[in-house]
Amino acid sequence: MRIISKPNKDEYPLYAEMYMRLVPEDGLVLQHLETNGILVKNLFLSIPGEKLLYRYAPDKWTLKEVLVHLVDDERIYTYRALRFARNENKELHGFNQDDFVKFSGANERDLYNILEEYDCVRKATITFFNGLPDEALTRVGRTNESTASVRALAYHITGHELHHLNIIREKYLKE
């Protein structure tokens, strides 16, 4: 897999710094996506079924909802990367993650079905970023009055997932 150097701080919005810090500086962001994908699948398969519906607080998502959120977020950020890589000059709209989760039906879905979707989205994401021309990686676009480069979006997807894995370990699986 190709090397994609870590974006500079001016290539992503300030809020994304929390995700960028979680990704190594080695340029192997696509390899990390692949490795994390295996980790996520193994983790979720190791969790007892009843625990998948656990909320650590009344207003927090279940583990199934977190997993579907990861899929949705990855899809959206890869779509943004596609638009920016193709030199889109229109500002893209944002999304309300809480509404997405609320209407996802995650808790009624079979875990294996969610993991199948997760796996397909992950493979598509890696294939997409791996196939981009080098000059597309530093193209920039706008969403919600903030800018991001294509490569920053790859790092965002990776770091966002790592962020949620940390929350899962700290809040859901800690006993």
Image: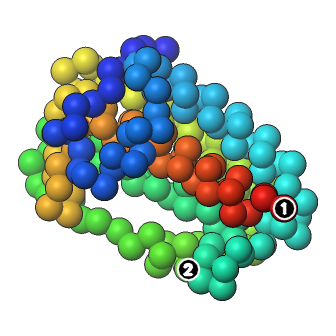
What residue lies at 78% left-to-right and 51% top-to-bottom?
A: 44
Mark 2 is on which residue type? Lys
- 45 to the left or right of 61: right
Which mark sits nearer the N-terminus, 2 or 1? 2
- Can residue 168 be seen at all in this image of the molecule? yes
Q: Which residue lies furthest to the left in this view?
A: 89
How many other residues sit within 10 Å of disc 1, few (<14), some (14-19) or many (≥20)?
few
Asked whether 11 or 70 is in front, the reply is 11
Q: Position of residue 79 (x, y in %)?
A: 35, 48
Write down the quadrant of residue 11 in the picture: top left
In this view, 15 is above or below 36: below
Q: Mark 2 points at which residue?
A: 102
Residue at 19 percent of width and 21 percent of height: 135
Q: x and y percent of residue 15 in the render? A: 31, 55
Residue 108's place in the image compared with 151, above or below, is below
Left or right of 82 in this view: 42: right
Residue 27 circle label:
none
Label 1 sits on residue = 175
Callout in the foreground (2, 1): 1
In the picture, which quadrant includes the C terminus?
bottom right
Image height check: is 42 above or below 103?
above
Instruction: Give coordinates of residue 31: x percent, y percent.
Output: 54, 23
Q: Residue at coordinates 69% horizontally, 43% vertically from top-left? A: 40
